[in-house]
Amino acid sequence: MKIKIITLLCALAVANLSNAQPTPAQVEGRSDTAERTQPAPLTGQDDSQSNSSDADVSDTGAQRPISLKKDGISAYFGFDSRYFYRSNPLATESAAKQPTGMWTNTFYTGAGLGVFDMDSYILTPYIGGSWTINDYVEGELSKFNYNSTSAYALLLAQFGNGWSARVGYNYAMDRSTDLDTEDYNDLSPNLGLMKAHSISPETTGIFDISVSIHETEAFVLPGQDEGKLNNNELSVSYGLKHIYGPFTISPKYRLSFKQYDTDDNDGRDDTTHNFNLKIDYDLAQSLKLTAFGGYSKRTSSGTVVNYDYESYDAGAAIGLTARF
């Protein structure tokens, strides 16, 4: 009889493990370390950064992206596959790290909806979206595999002095692969300024600053507010894009400051430092191979819970983009 009871308990434990629900802390950590696809004008997917080497000058002196048609829609779609090591995938304190390999596959698309000459600047509306399959390929985290969806709409104004301004609205959502439950979503209106400048014929510097409001819904414990991850964010970044023979080398530093004001996160402040290095090699006109690495560190204050963490990534990717 005792053997039967023990066997039944073991079976129930295995069943619960196979249908494990991420904890609220795991959902929050996963959302903080997730790679979100950025709008094309900010990532160079459509080569539309406004600098002297990759933009035409309109009659008014404002920079015009060369990859966009003067009239009509210029669209793109692509696929990106990444395999990498992540030392702290759930953004936990050092003692609770669960290092793992990750394999992500992203399908993305977007469009520039025409180029409008507004006398002193060029105005371009953009829309886009992506879908990412996120798999933990090592350790016990595979039961927390998830899919991410994102979408954006923005207006980008480019000026003749190399500055550009934007106003946008972003959407992000994470859904558990095994349980098919929505664990996290984020609606984010945002404003930003960007300056691209030529350092040398081979090197371009890009400065970016943005402010955003994040209205979220996340999986929480009973009695907690689903919007406890709501925050206001200020971020500043500076990156380089250096051409060295067949390689494009892109180091970047980003500083993010978040303030929370909901539930037990009320009064919480997060400061996050991100250092990234990416090296692209073009295999063909629309096909590239990438090696990348990064380091992140967050310090948090204002709550009893310790939200500090450190993490680093290293891996490789292959990407295919088509434009029409």
Image (tube, rainbow, N blue to C red):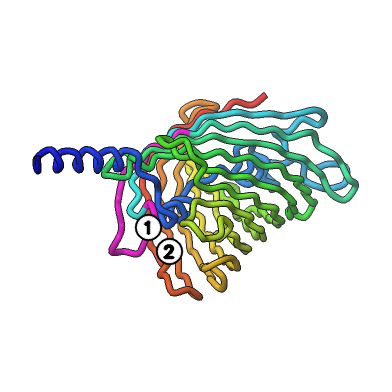
- At a point 74% along the width and 51% down the height, the residue shown is 166
- At a point 72% along the width and 36% down the height, the residue shown is 66
- Residue 82 visible: no
In the rendered image, which residue does mark 2 sit on? 297
- Residue 227 visible: yes
Label disc, if present, on residue 311 of the rendered structure: 1
Residue closer to the observer: 232 or 63: 232
Q: Which residues are magenta?
A: 89-105
Q: Earlier in the sequence, mark 2 or mark 1?
A: 2
Q: Are marks 2 and 1 in contact (CB under 8 Å)?
A: yes
Instruction: Determine the secondary structure under disc 2.
Output: strand
In the image, residue 171 sits, relative to residue 95, either above or below, namely above
Q: Residue furthest right?
A: 119
Query: Residue 239 at what x, y percent from top left?
Result: 55, 55
Is the residue marked by circle 1 packed among few (<14), some (14-19), or many (20+) residues within 10 Å? many
Instruction: Determine the secondary structure under disc 1.
Output: strand
Q: Residue furthest front?
A: 1
Residue closer to the observer: 99 or 2: 2
- At a point 53% along the width and 52% down the height, the residue shown is 218
Query: Residue 317 at what x, y percent from top left?
Result: 42, 36
Query: Residue 120 at what x, y percent from top left?
Result: 87, 51
Horizontally, residue 133 falls left or right of residue 128, namely: left
Question: Magenta includes 148?
Answer: no
